[in-house]
Image (spheres, rainbow, N blue to C red):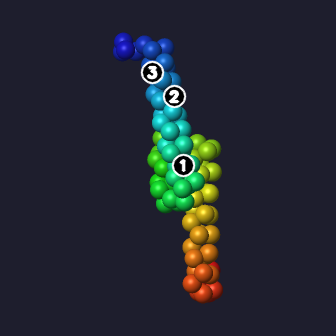
Amino acid sequence: LVPGDTAATALRAAADAGQKADDADRHTAKGQELFRQGQYDAARAASDDALALVPKHPAALALRLDAEVAKLVAAGQAALRQGRTADA
């Protein structure tokens, strides 16, 4: 880059943003796979990694919410199986 070259700086910023988006997509895809395996904490962590790169990444936001809800549902079901209805 040449100092003061606004076109080159803009191209570099666009390339960096594209790389962040690609990385966020990879984290989200990994999180979705972890979610399918029932690993809700790990899925949420992967969505948080994606959101650190792209804060409003739609799929990562949805995954984060799904993982939180699934974890709560699983905990409630476990409580019911153990007869702890007050905790369900």
**Coordinates of residue 50 in the picture (x, y in percent):** 50, 44
Residue 4 falls left or right of residue 17: left
Q: On screen, 17 above or below 29?
A: above
Label 3 environment density (alpha carbons within 10 Å; few <14, some 14–19, many ≥20): few
The circle on residue 33 is 1
> Nearer the viewer's eye, disc 1 or disc 3?
1
Does residue 26 show up? Answer: yes
Please tell me which residue lies in front, 56 or 8: 56
User: Which residue is painted at 54% across and 56% down in the image?
Assistant: 37
Dot 3 amino acid type:
Arg
Dot 2 amino acid type:
Gly
Q: Which quarter of the image is occupied by the N terminus?
A: top left
Q: On screen, 77 above or below 21?
A: below
User: Which residue is painted at 47% across and 30% down in the image?
Assistant: 19
Please tell me which residue lies in front, 63 or 37: 37
Residue at the disc numbered 2: 18
* Secondary structure beneath label 3: helix
Residue at the disc numbered 3: 12
Q: Earlier in the sequence, mark 3 or mark 2?
A: 3
